[in-house]
Image: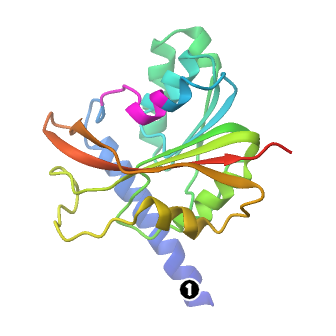
Amino acid sequence: MTDSHADLDRTADEAAHFWEDVYARRGDRVWSGRPNPILAETARTMPPGTALDLGCGEGGDSVWLAAQGWQVTAVDISTTALSRATAHAAAAGSAVARRLTVERHDLARTFPAGAFDLVNAQYMQTPFALPRARVFRQAAHALVPGGLLLIVDHGSVRPWAWDPDPNTHFPTPEEIFEALDLDCAVWRPERLDTPRREATGPDGQTATVTDTVIAVRRLAA
């Protein structure tokens, strides 16, 4: 048991170092700062409430949600990313900044407290071990009745990916949802889809990519 705990700690430390380096090695923003399109499309159909943004990065989604009136908890493993999210919110105005709270979490170890109308999990794919099904199950349980869990994954290889292996296997939306092992009397999938879109990478590259979309509703009590 001691060895397994040591392995878990070492993997977690490596993941934290990797993601901190992704952001810290660049003196400016890595991503565009704009919201992910499927989040924007989904959130526009919902009244503003409380939102949890898992793996928020530099806060493009979080700040956009706060600007729409949501009270947002933004979570990431990288302190540099969270600092940039805070600065992005401040630049958007005091009203937006007041609606954004940042928390550092390694989701393999800890999960933020609270209950939320929306949990947003965009592209939480990593070269390190992450118990994604467990994290997403925790996210589903963190929803208030009527709340929505939105998961968007990469469904195809992007040219700018850290591992551009064309033979990479991408789970289907159905496989990802089934792995959550949720009680169908409490949670219902509202969207299981693989749309295609034009995407832009961190250095301006463009490509047609496939997204994997899973939207899960917690049924009203």
Residue at horizontal 23 percent and vertical 58 percent from the top? 162
Residue at horizontal 18 percent and vertical 43 percent from the top? 208
Q: Residues within 10 Å of mark 1 (few under 14, many from 20)?
A: few
Inspect the magenta stretch and tell me whether residue 35 lies in it: yes
Quadrant position of the N terminus in the picture? bottom right
Secondary structure beneath label 1? helix
- Asked which quadrant contains residue 135, the reply is bottom right
Front residue of 48 and 18: 48
Percent x, y for residue 116?
A: 71, 38
In screen coordinates, is 199 left or right of 19?
left
Percent x, y for residue 97?
A: 58, 18
Name the residue carrying label 1: 4
Percent x, y for residue 37?
A: 39, 31
Q: Amino acid at mark 1?
A: Ser
In screen coordinates, is 148 left or right of 208?
right
In screen coordinates, is 5 left or right of 36?
right
In the image, residue 64 above or below residue 205: above
Front residue of 151 and 132: 151
- Asked which quadrant contains residue 182, the reply is bottom right
Q: For the view shown, which residue lies furthest in the right direction?
A: 221
Quadrant position of the C terminus in the picture? top right
Inspect the magenta stretch and tell me whether residue 111 lies in it: no
In the image, residue 4 above or below residue 52: below
Which residue range is magenta in the image? 32-41
Q: Is residue 58 visible?
A: yes
Residue at horizontal 76 percent and vertical 46 percent from the top? 219
Percent x, y for residue 164?
A: 17, 61
